[in-house]
């Protein structure tokens, strides 16, 4: 019998039935491995991960990360959406063709949804702080303090930067994805390209950390306010983010950034909160079932409604209704961000 190889992803996956698969060691069949990721440890603390996956239907994977690497991710095709919570905040990440994301999110958990519309291709670098310290030979001149703290393992702060890939980065990614080398030659080639990719993205990282506080233009404030009004008019069945950004003539990343900056929540969180408010009203002022409430308020299914409700109130909608109505206290609590 062939022994299954163990792989390392640096996260803990939680299955739908509640069991947790503790990583870094877990079993992955050859079929799943070939359809999901090629994980190449180039040096100690430096991994190159080539993801290529198209599920038969949209899938959702829960994860938990305690001490993450600094990660550079580049999406070549397909789409995935991640909801991430840390001790300090919550984030929504969209992996779409042409975008690159730099993130370091310690003590985080959440879920990733992978679309089945197109093959998802993501190339990412996982870089440990120890590797960076050794690679830089502990010469941090010109490096922002925020990055130095990560390298020295002193930072518990969140770092998240979204950008479009530069032409130089696209060329390097093409070489990584399309090379025909095998064995040792492949590893040597990929190591050189990974270091080149790391250098290019590190420049972007340092440039973003050094940027002064962004001043929001009046015209952008008006666009974000208009986006809020459009959503409020129909949060049950709101326009997609693509439809919204197209109408407002603003990029997806910029709208989410400005929405978070102005309203202290993302577009998705705003829609969720409006639906929760309406769901509460129906719970307290009507006798329709939980299932009917979920669809009436715009949730995809009762399970989705219950999960989102419990994230905010730590109890199910049914229990909430029983306790509040049972005590004759028809009070709608404020929405947590």
Image (spheres, helix red, strand yellow):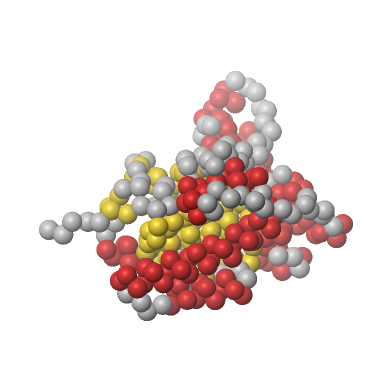
The foreground one among 220 and 163 is 163
> Could you say which is closer to the camera, residue 9 or residue 309?
9
User: In which quarter of the view is residue 198 placed?
Assistant: bottom right
* Residue 67 sits above or below residue 139 on the image: above
Vertical relation: 300 (above or below) 57: above
Residue at the far top in the pictured view: 327
Q: Residue at x 39, y 69 (%)?
A: 188
All told, the count of numbered labels is: 0
Up the image or down, 74 lies above or below 261; here it is: below
Q: Residue at x 67, y 31 (%)?
A: 333
Let me know if residue 151 appears in the view: yes
Quarter of the picture holding the C terminus? top right
On screen, residue 292 versus residue 212, left or right, reads left
Position of residue 176 measured from the top left corner of the image (x, y, whole percent): 45, 72
Task: Say which quadrant the N terminus sits in.
Answer: bottom left
Position of 125 with respect to 204 (left or right) is left
Residue 185: x and y in percent read 35, 73
* Front position in the image: 92 or 161: 161
Q: Nearer the viewer, residue 50 or 33?
A: 50
Q: Name the residue rendered at 22%, 56% in the picture.
A: 4
Q: Is residue 232 visible?
A: no
**Which residue appears farthest toward the left when viewing the image?**
1
Residue 129 position, x and y percent, is 50, 47
Whole-percent x, y for residue 296 in the image: 60, 49
Which residue is at a point 61% across and 75% down the rendered structure image? 167
**327 with respect to 193 (left or right):** right
Q: Is residue 238 left or right of residue 153?
A: right
């Amino acid at each position: 019998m062939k022994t299954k190889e163990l792989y390392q992803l640096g996260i803990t996956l939680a299955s739908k039935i509640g069991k947790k698969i503790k990583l870094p060691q877990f079993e992955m069949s050859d079929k799943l491995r070939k359809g999901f990721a090629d994980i190449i440890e180039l040096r100690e603390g430096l991994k190159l991960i080539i993801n290529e996956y198209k599920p038969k239907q949209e899938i959702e994977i829960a994860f938990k990360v305690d001490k993450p690497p600094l990660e550079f991710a580049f999406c070549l095709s397909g789409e995935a959406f991640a909801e991430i919570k840390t001790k300090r905040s919550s984030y929504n990440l969209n992996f779409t063709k042409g975008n690159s994301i730099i993130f370091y999110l310690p003590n985080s958990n959440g879920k990733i949804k992978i679309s089945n519309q197109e093959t998802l291709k993501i190339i990412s670098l996982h870089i440990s702080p120890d590797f960076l310290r050794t690679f830089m030979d502990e010469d941090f001149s010109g490096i922002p303090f925020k990055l130095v703290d990560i390298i020295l393992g002193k930072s518990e702060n969140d770092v998240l930067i979204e950008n479009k890939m530069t032409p130089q980065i696209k060329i390097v990614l093409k070489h990584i994805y399309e090379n025909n080398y095998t064995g040792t030659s492949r590893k040597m080639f990929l190591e050189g390209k990974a270091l080149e990719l790391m250098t290019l993205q590190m420049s972007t990282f340092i440039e973003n950390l050094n940027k002064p506080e962004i001043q929001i233009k009046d015209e952008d404030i008006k666009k974000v306010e208009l986006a809020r009004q459009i959503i409020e008019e129909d949060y049950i069945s709101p326009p997609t983010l693509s439809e919204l950004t197209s109408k407002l003539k603003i990029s997806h990343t910029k709208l989410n950034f400005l929405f978070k900056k102005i309203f202290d929540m993302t577009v998705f969180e705003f829609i969720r909160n409006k639906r929760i408010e309406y769901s509460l009203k129906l719970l307290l002022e009507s006798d329709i079932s939980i299932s009917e409430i979920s669809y009436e308020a715009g949730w995809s299914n009762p399970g989705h409604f219950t999960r989102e409700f419990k994230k905010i109130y730590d109890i199910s909608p049914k229990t909430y209704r029983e306790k509040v109505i049972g005590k004759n206290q028809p009070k709608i609590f404020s929405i947590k961000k």
